[in-house]
Image (cartoon, grey):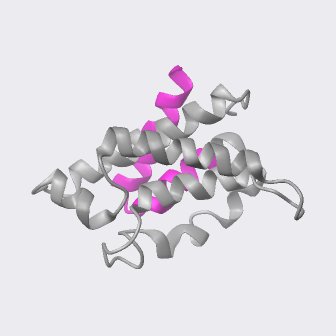
Amino acid sequence: MMKKKIIGKHAQAYFDSGFNCAEAVSLAVVEAFSPENGDVFPRIATPFGGGGAGTHQEMCGALAGGFMAIGTVLGRQDKINGSEAKMVAGEFREKFIESIGATQCEAILDQLGLQHNSEKCSELVRQSAELCASLLIKRGFQPRL
């Protein structure tokens, strides 16, 4: 499980360098599991950071970034398949709630309390990327690190 920790550290480093939470998680996971699709990240994830356009009112960007990464790796390319991506995303959401306690950005920020330079969000980004990676590894996908 060392590879998931590397992916988590990459996500955290992206976040600490200025990418938002959704960008950092999606970029690190997609780079590891589906690098051929990485050219659209972090651009596609940008509006999801900070709970939806930075409002903190919607889904946590780290959760949204994980959803985007799962969709990139497992998402359907036709209208017939797609249940595996939904199943993995559902499991990711459940484990995210178990670990973090909520899915809405503002509720999470309230739980985290005061922070300096988003250090608690940085840790949350790392945890989210590790969780997402572990679910993909569990299903037989190997990160290309």
Is residue 85 positioned above or below 134 on the image?
below
For residue 10, say whether it is visible. no
Which quadrant would residue 128 be assigned to in this image?
A: top left
Magenta highlight range: 1-30
- Front position in the image: 103 or 10: 103
- Front position in the image: 79 or 112: 79
Q: From the viewer's perspective, tell me whether residue 53 is left or right of residue 117.
A: right
Task: Please tell me whether residue 28 belongs to the stretch shown in magenta.
Answer: yes
Task: Please tell me whether residue 80 belongs to the stretch shown in magenta.
Answer: no
Residue 85 at x, y = what percent?
70, 49
Residue 28 at x, y = what percent?
55, 47
Indicate the quadrant containing the C terminus: top left, top right, bottom left or bottom right: top right
For residue 73, say whether it is visible. yes
Q: From the viewer's perspective, tell me whether residue 65 is left or right of residue 144.
A: left
Tell me the residue at 32%/79% (across/down): 55
Tell me the residue at 42%/75% (across/down): 52
Residue 111 at x, y = what percent?
17, 53
Which quadrant would residue 138 be assigned to in this image?
A: top right
Residue 130 at x, y = what percent?
48, 36
- Front position in the image: 78 or 1: 78
Is residue 119 positioned above or below 32 on the image?
below
Main secondary structure type of the part rendered in magenta: helix
| Name of the residue lying farthest toward the left | 114
- How many numbered marks are there? 0
Is residue 140 positioned above or below 118 on the image?
above
| Name of the residue lying farthest toward the top | 1
